[in-house]
Amino acid sequence: MAEQQAPEPSALLAAFDAVVRAQTSLTAELSRRAGIHDSALRTLVLLSETGYATPTEVAGYLGLTSGAVTNTTDRLVDAGLVERRRNPADRRGSLLELTAAGADLIADRQARYAAALRSVDAAHDGRLLPVLEDLANTLLIGAVDAHADTPTD
């Protein structure tokens, strides 16, 4: 049996870029269908993962200004996807939580991704999870290393 050659780095990068573009396209389509901006959908994903978040946490997660988060939050509240409530730990602050409609939108997103991942995983004999975990960890280490290499003034 002949040994399989490793793909060229340029082919790996092209395949990875294709995955990123496909994910970006799916996010854009789901956002369009919901009548919200891509960053608003990312806000809903964060709230789904954490249960709730402060506007400051959303700003940090998305890399947005507080003004942009306020606009996004206002639109999500108006769309009935998020509710804003008082933060019991900070009387001046608020907490953001998904409404049932917001949770339904995220459940649809998750179902679409889950179906695609199950299909690809099955086609590769259940080996997708460790590959994705290794890739995520390697990229995170690279991000940390790049940050450490950044000069500070």
Image (tube, grey):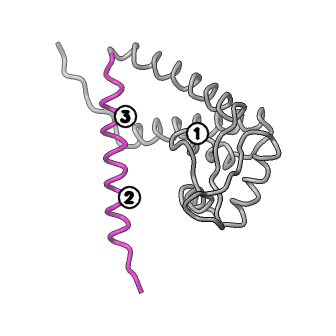
Dot 2 alpha-carbon crowd within 10 angstroms: few under 14, some 14 to 19, many 20 or more: few
Q: CA distance from mark 1 to mark 2?
A: 20 Å
Dot 3 alpha-carbon crowd within 10 angstroms: few under 14, some 14 to 19, many 20 or more: few
Residue corresponding to mark 2: 143
Residue corresponding to mark 1: 21
The answer to which quarter of the image holds residue 13 is top left
Residue plotted at (40% across, 13% down): 122
Q: x, y percentage for residue 121?
A: 40, 19
Give the answer, above or below, for where 100 lies relative to 95: above
145 is within the stretch colored magenta = yes
- What numbered label is drawn on residue 132? 3
| Region of the chain picked out in magenta, as a range | 126-153
Q: First in sequence, mark 1 or 2: give its number.
A: 1
Residue nearer the viewer, 1 or 151: 151
Using residue 5 as the reference point, say whether residue 105 is left or right of it. right
Q: x, y percentage for residue 143?
A: 38, 58
